[in-house]
Image (cartoon, helix red, strand yellow):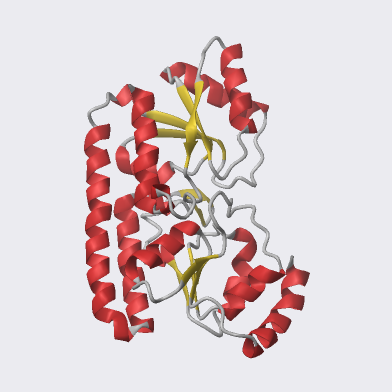
Amino acid sequence: MKALIKFLLPITLLVSCEAPKGAEVLATTSVVADAARQLLPPEVEVQALMQSNIDPHSYKPVEKDVHAITSAQIVLHNGLHLEGKMTEILEKVSLTKPVYEMSESLTSLELITVGPNVFDPHIWFDLKLWERCVSELALFLIEQYPEYSVIIESRSEAYSAKLLNAHNTFYNKSNEIPDSLRAIVTAHDAFSYFGRAYGVKVKGLQGVSTAAEFGVKDMSNTADFIVKTGLNTVFTETSVNSKSIEALQEAVEQKGGKVRLGKPLYSDALGEQGTKEATLIGAFKYNTTQILNSWK
């Protein structure tokens, strides 16, 4: 990968100087692209490098991706190594153009630690935390587009209200469920911030990255957790292969339990453009509906 970057980056930078301008605003993921679209007026083009159902943890950038990043006027990314294989490219590009990291407004005390100086990157499903990230993004975009400052500020205030309303609505609904039932099991550990924010016990078969391996012990421990908590549903994810959860279902049966596969949750990517789930709030409402139904 390093060889690819070193070879492609100088060439792409040269080509991008001669070719037509790329995206005005390029976001690495659909989640980050949604945040920018909520703030900017429609005339400002926002593109997502990774579309729906794409897993950013294992996504490998190719030549066209390097060109897209280097030819964009502004680049937005999540940070915290969510886009692990793009980190070096993003660092190089930040030397020549505005590059903004959504997680930079959060302190280490607000982040979930998963290792020495390693933090869980899935910050967007704590809507209260994400609201802060989006508000800080608005300030960055006002600097880039002073001519739209009034519009961005207005849209930011309106979107913040929507995020906080969705946060409060689910928080209140989840608190109507007994503590012993508020638990979910998913394909990988993408919902820790969600669990912390809404008082839900969360267990992922894989770690915070889908690139992490899981073994027989992980499968057995997760199956034990399911049987102990009495869960009747486990969830696959739209951006993660479902085979691991299907195997988990069999492991639970071997321990005398029984679970069904719930509808896939949106985790690292949002839904297809044109659907309600193409926005973070839409995906959040879909997810929480499935989760609430699994507790009833």
Q: Where on the picture, by quarter, is residue 274?
A: bottom left
The residue nearer to you, when weighing 45 against 16, is 45
The answer to whether 207 appears left or right of 78 in the picture is right
* Quarter of the image that includes the C terminus: top left
Residue 284 sits above or below residue 179 on the image: below
The answer to whether 92 appears left or right of 117 in the picture is right
The residue at 47%/49% (across/down) is 271
The residue at 63%/25% (across/down) is 247
The residue at 58%/72% (across/down) is 90
Q: Position of residue 233 (x, y in %)?
A: 46, 24
Q: Position of residue 288 (x, y in %)?
A: 35, 37
Q: Position of residue 57 (x, y in %)?
A: 60, 53
Residue 116 sits above or below residue 183 on the image: below
The residue at 48%/62% (across/down) is 78
Q: Position of residue 88 (x, y in %)?
A: 63, 70
Residue reaching furthest to the front: 274
The answer to whether 193 appears left or right of 213 in the picture is left
Residue 58 sits above or below residue 213 on the image: below
